[in-house]
Amino acid sequence: MPKNQGNPLKKELMGLGKERAQHVADGLGEGERPPGAYAVGKDRTTDKIYYGDSGPETGHEQAVMDAMPEESQRKEINDRPPGVCAEPRMFTNAIQDGADPKNIDLVTVNTKGGQIQDVRELQDMGSRIRRRGPYRMNGTPERRALQELRDALPESATFEVNPLDVEESCQRYTEDGYEVTDQLREFLETYGELTLVLKFQNVEVELTTSVERTLESTHATPRNVRIFSKELGQPVLLVGTVFVTEEAVLLAENGDVLFAGDAGYQRIANGFQDAIRALATGDWDRTFF
């Protein structure tokens, strides 16, 4: 797919989510508050569309409740009742209509102050819901890591996760001349196809681990990565791109996350989650070396 070309399914569901938000807003009485989020799902086997608005936590299918992460089920952690999010309502509606959750593609549109603030695409969420027995959404390391990262970010951040095919992503790296190591595969499984827009001191910073955008970014060549590794004294992986200047996001063998560009290197933090938190708060050393 050409760079920056949109995902037609995502655009369709985003459009339906925005229409749903507007429809609900138009029907509100004076003083009534709209839901904070609207989930739209499409069954890829039947093309049926399902909606869910954030709101009452009652009436969900038990399989959906069982699949919710612990932080969503415990009010003392989340400071709100379990099941109030839009996604459980959408999946409940789909299951009650006879749909299989694993066939559902999902987009959630979050609203803040009446404006569309954030769009999440979580294609694989439905695969974590089973009709019988508990099977939590955060039952795998990659989902748990993304949920933990999202929870740690400020409300002003935009958080988007796009569909991920790890084998296809590894193939793209191989075709472009990069070595696919166990560390790279683990990173892709955990944080692949993630795009963040962080706001700090009225400045927006975009970081993405989209394989397509990463491998097409300014500094993305195997030769550059070999040079980075030699200058830094340890193997590094190209795992993303950041800023409008398309600096390379590097993951070092020791877990350090660094930015690399024409001006040199900047160490952000050890560990990707800590690096994103540091970037969101501005608490990182901007010194180039």
Image (cartoon, grey):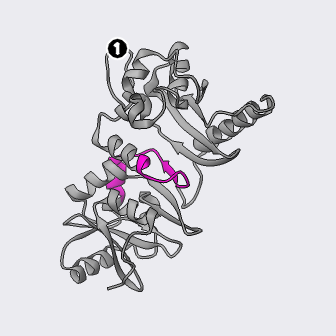
Q: Residue at x 33, y 55 (%)?
A: 171
Q: Is residue 148 magenta?
A: no
Q: Is residue 158 magenta?
A: yes
Residue depicted at 47% across the width and 37% down the height: 123
Image-based side of 209 in relation to 57, left or right = left
Whole-percent x, y for residue 230 in the image: 21, 81
Identified at 56% across, 38% down, the residue is 108
Q: In the displayed structure, does residue 140 sit left or right of residue 45? A: left
Q: Quadrant of residue 250?
A: bottom left
**What residue type is disc 1 on?**
Arg
Q: Secondary structure at mark 1?
A: loop
Using residue 202 as the reference point, say whether residue 80 is left or right of it.
Answer: left
Residue 56 in the figure: left or right of residue 236: right
Find residue 33 and report its horizontal and vertical position in percent: 70, 33
Report crowding for label 1: few under 14, some 14 to 19, many 20 or more residues within 10 A (C-alpha).
few
- Please state which of residues 174 and 16 is positioned toward the viewer in this rendering: 16
Q: Magenta span covers which residues?
A: 150-172
